[in-house]
Image (cartoon, grey):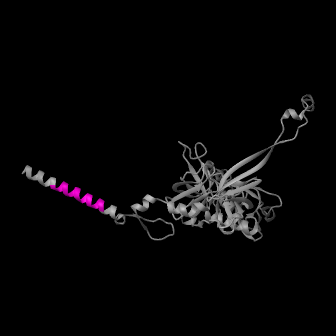
Amino acid sequence: MKKTTIFILQWVIAGLAIAFVILLATDRLDNKTTIIELGNQHTHGTESSKVTIKALQTGFSQAVKTAAPAVVYIFTARVVAEPSHPFLRDRVFREFFGSDDNKPQRRLETGLGSGVVVSPQGYILTNNHVIQGADQIQVLLADGRGGIAHIVGSDPETDLAVLQVGLDRLPVIHIGQSRSLNVGDVVLAIGNPFGVGQTVTMGIVSATGRQEIGITTFENYIQTDAAINPGNSGGALINPQGELVGINTAILGGNGGNQPNAQGIGFAIPIALAKNIMQQIITQGYVTRGWLGIEVQDIDPRLAYALDIPFDEGALIRRVQADSPADESGLRSGDILVAIAGEKVASARDALNQIVRARPNEKIALKVWRGGKTLTMPTVPNQRPQL
């Protein structure tokens, strides 16, 4: 009985081995027989996609081939005047050493970053901090061509800028849908980190709608763990189809970037926001935003208790600027904004976002809580002053 059992087991094991070899040979002859289901890609809101082992091995090379030519290097230069040495300001010192040179010293300061070609007319999206204060801006394409770019306009409050370069046959990136991004979606960052040359890194969408990071006035960032380093600013964040979904903007980390042993966190401006800002800059030279002339702060439970306020949401008006739209409409320090144009105000950030969405010179209604009463106050916002 024991010998029979052993004999059967030997044949079973041999059969399994032969089956494994046959399956392996079949897969090598035609890798399409091995299919992995990747559900809910959320690239275009379509049904789940099927990819083969071969497709996984090639990774996202096609996406990079599609997008990378439109990602450019940006080199900036500016002349910086430095004050002369304090000793040279002393007349006796200058006479003793025979020097009359008390003029400020000048030096050339250079910078680098990235940008994305978004139209055949040569418009390039980048970050404002990449080109801010530059006397000259040079753009270098991935194909080796280069040219001098000029600033069409910028928006420091979102850290966006639009450049234009006069080159023919420009590679233009495809614009994607940042609003369809979900946490966990794969994204790739393309840029020129540390000036080493065009580099591609991969990660996922870690979060969307990130605010109150303290980088700019108006924040609505895509957070990603794709490595973003100095020089990547203004570069492209793309989806697996090679479509632009964000403009890489900022990094957080233990050593200021994705260095070893640092928890790298990158932020990108969603293309939906960047596209809107770009169109306004190109068509009118500035971004339309409402302005009332108030400073506000959050209402938290402790402040509500101290002020004997029967709710812990809204925005407390700390200061009203003289001769501002808020001043003319009768708002006072100590008032609490409850709603703007019919939209509830839950925080100071809510109030700011709702005010800037209001169109200048068009009347809106403010709902204000004052001294135990709710008041409705009409006001007409002005255009928000440029920084």
Left or right: where does residue 222 sit relative to residue 99? left
- Magenta-colored span: 11-25
Residue drawn 45% across the image and 65% down it: 40
Left or right: where does residue 376 sit relative to residue 235? right
Q: Position of residue 356 (x, y in %)?
A: 71, 63
**Residue lying furthest front:** 144
Residue 17 is inside the magenta segment:
yes
Residue 203 is inside the magenta segment:
no
**Residue lying furthest top:** 96
Quadrant in which the C terminus appears: bottom right
Magenta stretch mostly in which secondary structure? helix
Q: Looking at the image, is 57 positioned above or below residue 341? A: above
Left or right: where does residue 265 sit relative to residue 367? left
Residue 207 picture quarter: bottom right
Residue drawn 23% across the image and 55% down it: 17
Residue 382 picture quarter: bottom right
Residue drawn 26% across the image and 58% down it: 21
Task: Choose between 188 and 372: the one closer to the eye.
Answer: 188
Does the image show residue 310?
Answer: no
Task: Choose between 332 and 140: the one closer to the eye.
Answer: 140
Q: Position of residue 216 (x, y in %)?
A: 68, 54
Q: Position of residue 310 (x, y in %)?
A: 64, 58
Task: Choose between 299 and 347: the one closer to the eye.
Answer: 347
Residue drawn 47% across the image and 65% down it: 41
Q: Position of residue 242 (x, y in %)?
A: 54, 64
Does the image show residue 137?
Answer: yes
Left or right: where does residue 62 sit relative to residue 295? left
Counting the numbered discs, the total is 0
Q: Looking at the image, is 369 positioned above or below residue 250? A: below
